Image (tube, coloured by chain):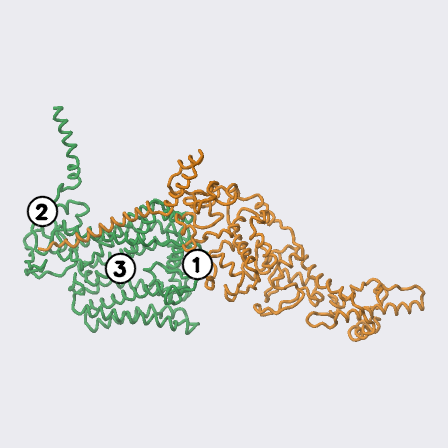
Amino acid sequence: MAESATREFIHNLYDLPRTLKESCFRLGKEPQSEREESQATFHNLFLHIHSVRVHVRTLKPTLTFGLGLMATASFVITIITGVLLMVYYKPSTDLAYQSIKDIHFTVSTGRFIRNIHRWSAQLMVLVVLLHMARVFFTASYKKPREFNWLVGLGLLVITLALSFTGYLLPWDQLAYWAITIGSNIANSPREFTDAIHITKFFDPGGLQKRLLLGANYVGQDALIRFYVLHVFVLPLALVTLLGVHFWRIRKDGGLAKPEDPPGGLAEWGGERRPVFQPLATKTYGLMALVKGKRPPVNRGPENTVMSWPHLFWAELSIFMVTVATTLILSYYYDAPLKELANAAVPENPAKAPWYFLGLQELVSYSAFMGGMLIPIIVLVGLALIPFLDRRPGGEGTWFGTSRERPVFWQSLLFACAVTVGMLAFTVNYGWLRSWFPNIHQLWIIAINPGSLLVLIFAAWSLFILKRNDSVRLSAVALFTCFLVSFTLLTYFATVHRGPNWHFYWWPSQWPVH
Amino acid sequence: MKDPSRIYRWLLLVASVVTIAYLVGAAVRENYLAQWQSVQNEYRNILREKATDGRGRELLAKFRVEMKQASIPALGTVDRCVTCHNGIDDPRMSDVPQPHRAHPGHILDQHPVDRFGCTVCHHGQGAAMTFNEAKAEDVFWDYPLLPPELTEATCVTCHDAEKLPPDQIPLLTAGMKLYQEKSCGSCHKLGGRGGTLGPALDNEGAKTKHQLIMTNLKPPHTTWNWQNAHFRDPGGVVPDSLMRNPTVTRPEAAALTAYMLSQWKRDVPESYLAPDKIEQKYRALHPTPLTGEQVFGQYCTACHGNGTYTRWDKKFNRFIPAIRGVSLISTATREYFQSNIEQGRPGTQMPAWGPHAGGLLPEEISGVIEYLRSGAAAAPATAVLTLHGDSTRGHTLFLRNCAGCHGMNGRGGIAPEIGNPVFQQSATDDFIARTIRNGRVATAMPAFQRPDAPALSDQDLADVLTYLRTLAEQRGQKARAQNPTPATPSRGKP
């Protein structure tokens, strides 16, 4: 007995790597059949959010360009690097700057990790915006995905908030003055309440600013608030919403795709194959409970492929592409760190983070209109899209309905012309205040380049609605105008706005100060 | 059938290879290619060459290639300069090239690196690990490395510049003197004393380049270049500056620059302060009053010159009065001076100089008033006294200018009787000459000699004076005729 127990012990020891692996993965081995590939997917906590089979269109690179995955990947990267940075960062106005300097100069790979954190955060903002554009132009917000569009909007806002709160933490001049600008934008309802003399009784702007900063200025209270938001509240909110976002993708039937012709043939890999037809009488296992029409089990429909391994190759590769991109950026470009924050030495120009620069340009015309009303209008407008454009069609296809492409190009040109014209006019001739110095502020709040842009774009969208008799096309027109003016305003404020928010062709022409 | 995930597997391969390549690259760059590592390897070789005795061998054996720093929590600094300046406190390293060389002089004997660090004296970014970032002229850092000759500016953080040996702080010593000579205090406050036309300079050294207008300055845009250029041509550096050109030479500009950089109210723990610094602080609280002449020189002359002439100031667009000039001295009362000095003259550029404004002590204000009022009267009277007077001409002048009030032959009218023998005996020639020239404050007696429009020249004064003295003789003759007591004229001149 003793001998066999010894042998068993040695045998088990020898088998340890295999048994350990088998115990980790419920399937316990490389999947050999499609059945086991399904199990590999739904027997894994992290993979089971995927369906076991995906439509082949899901894997088409030009459908999504992997933008949503990229946003998720950059979020994961910021989480990992962010936790590492938290180890060294000290959220106190006395220590924060020095701790960043230490991370920069002496913490092993600290500079690289901070660069990665910074660049992946920037990439995340950019990719989230592009992802939204992708979803819009492929009409992927349509029924049953309206709610996920809303969740996506929430994620966009949280992403911007995450990036913005992170901006303050280094406690350098860039941070200090960008947040000062940002909190003044939060304060912007005052422009309106001041104009009608009710600030004394009703001051939402001041309330917002004090809520944000915990004081009337950017100081220790603001820093700790931003820190808590940045490392705890907002990531938690984002992860939660992200979970909902993914879950709804799955429950709403995967990526939006056009209806396959019933009973016909679908093109796939150069071959035409019969499309799977669900039988009305058959239950397709647990998978059939989802809202989509056909995630069948056990039989490979011709227009779907196994998630394992195809989808996972795709996801992994997009993740690695994101990692590689941030690494390349981080290797060559250091995250900015200016002088220690100094309330006595204002940055001029004090610019908000780049994604708010378009807003800052509008704020320079009217704080209330640019900083409060227009963002609300834009967000509400975006949120309403899936509820106003309810006619099916075009899902999962770029510019899927008829005349979308021409309307897109027309709107692009129109918005370019209007935005550039408006900026050129404002730069050359000023605005109401330059012509009528004593005009009431309410006039400027109501009529300024920002509000005019909104009105013109709304009118254009209505014109498209009438002309083409299509809600979708009018939405395309409006959304294109929004994207174009956002891009142009951001570019304009980044490059052409110098000290005192004056116009300069290039930053090299700024007066040295 | 085409593999739908083929493209992704290629993508994954490429992205993974790129990722690994850049991770390895970053690791190599940080761990093997850092500037300070090659510097320390060089230093180790130098140590090896110099390891001739037991101590040298011990230092070599102890030497590790690693980041080194002087962390001084009391000063809030972490200085990693010693990571590259390894030989800074090793006297054997006086002949090796930088950055291995020992610190020159004996400064480190009293200022050991582990107690003071480096940046408290030299500025620069102590936390940095490369020379460019430590020098910090072109990176985002408020206080870049001071040029060696200006480093003395930071001595006054802990020392009283007046108590340090002047040969160790030549620029500061010269700068302090120039500050007083050029009467910078007329417009600038320092230590609570000075005018308000220019900015206070107490924290001038703490200014960063972003607080100075660099538009018209040739690079490099450092604060010391700005100060230097600004001293040589204020209007050229700051357009529309009100500052008068102090007309300084290049060495003088350098001295003033060092003095400005030294003006930094920097908080350092008391244990770092030299005893003389603490005394200096005590002295600042209990100042010794300056004399009137010193006050005038340090706080008035930038605008008023020597005070004896009026001039038109183009920048102020108004006349600056001759505050030691005859006409003012002779008309203005002491109270008038006092209120003008203490409270300033609203509507003009003249600031208030009272204890709560310009910071002058009451004694100093009295002193400067005495100085102002004495000044104009004193000097030129001698010129009159050395001249030969002509009493006939004096008589004519007297009739024309004086007789209206003082009466024919000085018999008195609405003004006192000049011929009065008591007056003639007690009044010296100097007193009479000055009175005529300056007038008499608080009387109707006007000044008869003003720089702007002199009514009587010095010769005229001498003539009148000679004539006045004849009045006594005339009286004496009359008196002698009635009463044989002789009257002796005080003046022996013809």
Q: Specify the colour of chain A.
A: green
Task: Look at 25% across and 66% down and name the residue there.
Answer: A480
Callout 1 secondary element: loop
Q: Earlier in the sequence, mark 2 or mark 1?
A: 2
Label 1 sits on what residue type?
A: Pro
Task: Look at 85% across and 64% down and name the residue there.
Answer: B492
Q: Earlier in the sequence, mark 3 or mark 2?
A: 2
Q: Which chain is orange?
A: B
Q: Are marks 1 and 3 on the same chain?
A: yes
Relative to B290, A101 lies left or right: left
Q: Is residue A460 above or below residue B171?
A: below
- The residue at which mark 1 appears reads as A346
- The residue at which mark 3 appears reads as A129
Badge 2: residue crowd in 10 Å (few <14, some 14–19, many ≥20): some
Q: Quadrant of the C terminus of chain A?
A: bottom left
Tell me the subunit letter for badge 3. A
User: Do the residues under discs 1 and 3 have CB atoms within 8 angstroms?
Assistant: no
Q: Mark 2 to mark 1: distance in Å?
A: 65 Å
Q: Mark 1 to mark 3: distance in Å?
A: 31 Å
Label 2 sits on what residue type?
A: Arg
Relative to B264, A383 lies left or right: left
Image coords of residue A276 (percent x, y): 7, 56
Q: Is residue A91 visible?
A: no
- The residue at which mark 2 appears reads as A35
Badge 1: residue crowd in 10 Å (few <14, some 14–19, many ≥20): some
Image coords of residue B345 (percent x, y): 61, 64
Tell me the subunit letter for badge 2. A
